[in-house]
Amino acid sequence: FDSTPLGRIINRFTKDMNVVDNMLMAMFRSFVGMLFTLVSTILLIGINTPYTFIVMVAVFMLFYWMQRYYRASSRELKRLDSIARSPVYSLFGETLSGMTTVRAFEAQERMIKLNVKGVQHYQRFVYALYSANRWLSIRLELLGGAVILAAGMFAVMKRNELGAGVLGMTLSYTFPITSLLNGLIRIFTELEK
């Protein structure tokens, strides 16, 4: 006879319902908006400084590799996070339902220690997930910096052909590329889960 622990059922149900009810449509809307903004930004930069496309091809190949690596890692870390969260919910629920028994046997300290141990175990996976997010952010900042550097260099090379306003607009549109790439990967990863 095999059964699913109550904590796992509650964890899955509450998490899934929260995602479907509150987050799914907003994340999808943000994803589409960021994607269109990124494509229009790349087109604007490429039209004004065409040589930037050469750098962008290399950057986007690295971006593709990083997002594949991050998504696989993030998916596994989220799975481990969910597995580690279930016993915490289960133990907390069991402690609340058996509070009179816990008090009768004066086991409050033992139950507190068990709950703290479960939360600490769960926090390891949360920390690993945050570390993976920081790993991605640092690398995307470097890629974004490469695009900004390339656009700036090619803008300086074309300073006689294009006006100062067009070059200023091109350079100002390169700055949000890093945050757009970062946001796209994060939202895509969340939508994937």
Image (tube, rainbow, N blue to C red):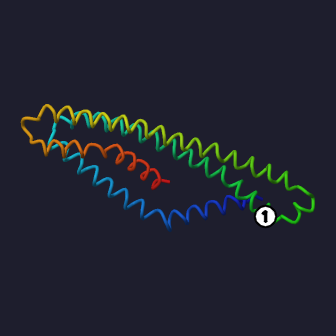
Disc 1: which residue: 96
Tell me if 89 is positioned left or right of 42 in this view. Answer: right
SS category of the residue bearing label 1: helix
Tell me if 50 is positioned left or right of 193 in this view. Answer: left
Tell me if 135 is positioned left or right of 100 in this view. Answer: left
Q: Residue at x 23, y 51 (%)?
A: 40
* Image location of residue 142, percent across then percent down: 37, 34
Q: Residue at x 80, y 60 (%)?
A: 95
Instruction: Name the outermost residue toward the right.
Output: 105
Mark 1 closeness class: few <14, some 14–19, many ≥20 residues within 10 Å = few
Q: Is residue 123 above or below residue 17?
A: above
* Image location of residue 114, percent across then percent down: 79, 50
Q: Is residue 53 above or below residue 101?
A: above
Instruction: Name the outermost residue toward the bottom.
Output: 21
Disc 1 marks which amino acid? Answer: Leu
The one nearer the camera, 169 or 98, is 169
* Image location of residue 175, percent across then percent down: 29, 43
The one nearer the camera, 124 or 166, is 166
